Amino acid sequence: MERLVPARAGNSTAVQFTLEGFPAVQHLGKVLFLLHLLAYLASVTGNSLIITITWADRHLHTPMYFFLSTFSFCECGFITSVIPKLLTIFMSGRQMISFAACFTQAFVFLFLGATIFFLMAVLSLDRYLAICKPLHYHIIMNPRVCFLLVTACFSLGFLLMVVPIIKLSQLSFCGSNVIPHFFCDFGPLTNLSCSETRSTQMLFFILAFFVLFTSLFVTIVAYSNIVVTIMRLPSAKERQKAFSTCSSHLAVLSLMYSSCIFIYMKPKQMSRLDSNREAALVNTVVAEPHLHPAQ
């Protein structure tokens, strides 16, 4: 078993972790590498096209496409913080990652993940106003409000995730340096610390709960009103068209919320690490890249 010299973030001693990846399927590494590389390239290309087309076509300079292009930007950063390292693991097995790089990866992943959830809530609110309040939509969703909403999403994501990551980085790490995951996530890192982590874990649990259930509450309220409004439409064709515009968004929400609630909504992060690893793979490789709300 690999060992770490006890260290703190402020020490000059270089500390490295080892990302374990998926040792049970390492014999399929080349196949998995190819599949995940294609998925990654497809996602980055698709999101880049959404951003480029949105900003190039003046007809798409609307609140919805502004939010979607922002979502695409965050999604590119979110998966890029994880997938390249996963591809290296599939090709070469376990990978070393420095102390600084590990905590940077954890912060970027959680910061952009939280921002994406807030953006999903904003998209739900945008669709509620477009469908339920069409006459007031352009008055409410003016450029200033759109900019403030996106700024609020990034600000909340940053402020809510930077505190627990800083607290985690200040803990002492000793014993095994093997992270049973394919990236530096909060739960596996807390389990490697030889310090008292209960307060740090509870802080993260409370903040993660706030991110997930605040955005989920806004989304549920918005879509409840959307469904009521759609059911009142006189034409079956109009109802079908309205439901189809929301179906992809609902598919994203169901996968994202179910996987993240399964991973993070446990006060004790030590349990079910293998299941967490699989759920995180679903969230980063399936839910995020291939169920974009614009599709």
Image: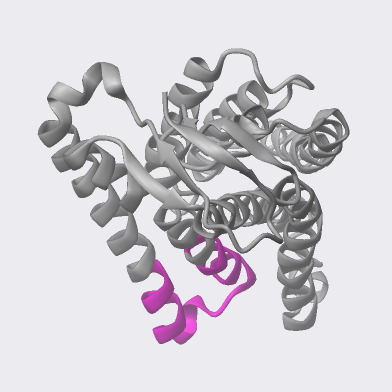
Question: From the viewer's perspective, is 21 left or right of 93?
Answer: right
Question: Is residue 229 placed above or below 149 in the rendered structure?
Answer: above
For the residue pair 223 and 81, the one nearer the viewer reads as 81
Quick check: 269 left or right of 100?
Answer: right
Q: Nearer the viewer, residue 277 or 89?
A: 89
User: Depth check: 63 or 147 in front?
Assistant: 147
In percent of width and height, residue 118 lies at 71, 52
Tell me: residue 121, above or below residue 202. below
The quadrant of the rendering that contains the N terminus is: top left
Q: How is the image coloured?
A: one colour
Segment colored magenta = 50-72
Q: Is residue 131 visible?
A: no
In percent of the image, x 73 and y 77: which residue is there?
A: 147
Foreground residue among 179 and 51: 179
Q: Position of residue 77 (x, y in %)?
A: 47, 61
As drawn, 202 above or below 162: above
Q: Is residue 47 above or below residue 42?
A: below
Left or right: 136 as drawn, with respect to 18:
right
Return the x and y of residue 228 as percentages of the image width and height: 76, 33
Asked if residue 61 can be seen in this view, the reply is yes
Task: Name the image quarter holding residue 209.
Answer: top right
* Residue shown at 64% from the left, 39% from the top: 173
- Residue 65 in the magenta stretch? The answer is yes
Residue drawn 67% across the image and 53% down it: 127
x then y, percent, for residue 138? 74, 73
Give the quarter of the image for residue 208. Answer: top right
Question: Is residue 193 found inside the magenta-colored segment of the image?
Answer: no
Residue occupying the far top of the picture: 272
The quadrant in which residue 236 appears is top right
Look at the magenta stretch and give its main secondary structure. helix
Q: Residue at x 67, y 60 (%)?
A: 11
